[in-house]
Image (tube, helix red, strand yellow):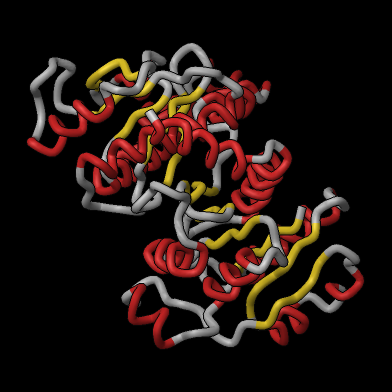
Amino acid sequence: MRIGIDVDSGERPFQELVSGALESSYQNQNISYFLIGKSDRIRDSFNDIESYSNVFLVDAKEFIQMDESPILALKKKRDATVLIGCRMLRNNTIDVFFSPGNTGATVAASVLTLGTINGIKKPSMAAFFPRIGGGETLILDIGANPETNEETLFHNAILGHAYYRVVWDKTEPTIGLLNMGAEIGKGSTNIKKAFNYLSGISSFIGNVEGYNVLNGSVDVVVCDGFTGNSILKFAEAMKELFSSTLKDVFSDKDKGKNKQNLLSYTFDALGIYKEKKRVITERITPKYFGAAPLLGVNGCVLVGHGMCSKRDLINSISLAYKLYKDKYMRKISLNVKNFLKK
């Protein structure tokens, strides 16, 4: 597999992403890494980078800032990292492109450079959420299109169905439409129209609510990008709150500065707290975190979080390799074609 990595566009220093790529390259000699960014400063920070046989530098003099208008920036910066990466994907120089930069710019560059799969008008981003009893629930859209119509929501369902099949190897993942109630006839006019569209899918189970995302009753939850992104950010904050609360409870900080609860002391001494925290963190962290695929474009594009860390990047590369190995693009294109023929 050949992966292009935009190392300049994220909110963290470029050194962290380069470091993550180098660590991954050492562990995966069968993957070629194309680091897209300012080559000179990468060489200055990593003197031995030329010694990595499977790492290559692709020079890019500019990148799109997080607060820039995507369309205006793409017109002005013709050789920005995100455009170079998409061109490399279109020209078959790489198999996967990853960027943790401006989401709007990544979406726009992908659509303008790669085009969309036949029948799909707007791409969608998807993310997995852990759920009770094991397994994961997929939510889309999580930010590619804040405003959608009923047709776009239908396309999201098709794309999510195909993606879930690839990652979890489930023949008929169930699909639910996120709504304010499970009853038929609830929601906005747009949601009601989308319900009629989705009713033509055999695995569609109807309207679902927020709690269904976590209780394991549905595999794919369809919503607009504004709602999906809000859920994602809320979940990230809840994870931090849970971790902080767990730490406070075990540290027993409210018992007084000079008095420590015996149970807390014992847990700390035996390392039980750290071990339990590790187990809980693993349980509430999706298997493939760090990046969301941009579903519906003619190429494998992964969109990372702006604050993408070294660990996030390494895990995103694992996802990229799985999608490449499982022929994700071919399968998702066939799935879309079969659904739209019905």
Above-or-below relation of 54 to 157: below
Say which of 195 and 232 sits in front: 195
Residue drawn 21% across the image and 51% down it = 147
- Quadrant location of the C terminus? top left
Say which of 87 and 104 sits in front: 87
Q: Is residue 87 visible?
A: yes
Residue 216 placed where, x, y %? Answer: 41, 15
Q: Is residue 258 visible?
A: no
What is the quadrant of residue 211 in the picture? Answer: top left
How many numbered discs?
0
Residue 303 placed where, x, y %? Answer: 50, 55
Residue drawn 53% across the image and 71% down it = 82
Say which of 187 and 258 sits in front: 187
Residue drawn 25% across the image and 52% down it = 146
Say which of 209 and 151 sits in front: 151
Above-or-below relation of 254 to 127: above
- Left or right of 23 in this view: 166: left
- Left or right of 222 in this view: 123: right
Residue 92 placed where, x, y %? Answer: 69, 64
What is the quadrant of residue 65 in the picture? Answer: bottom left
Residue drawn 73% across the image and 40% down it = 325
What is the quadrant of residue 238 in the picture? Answer: top left
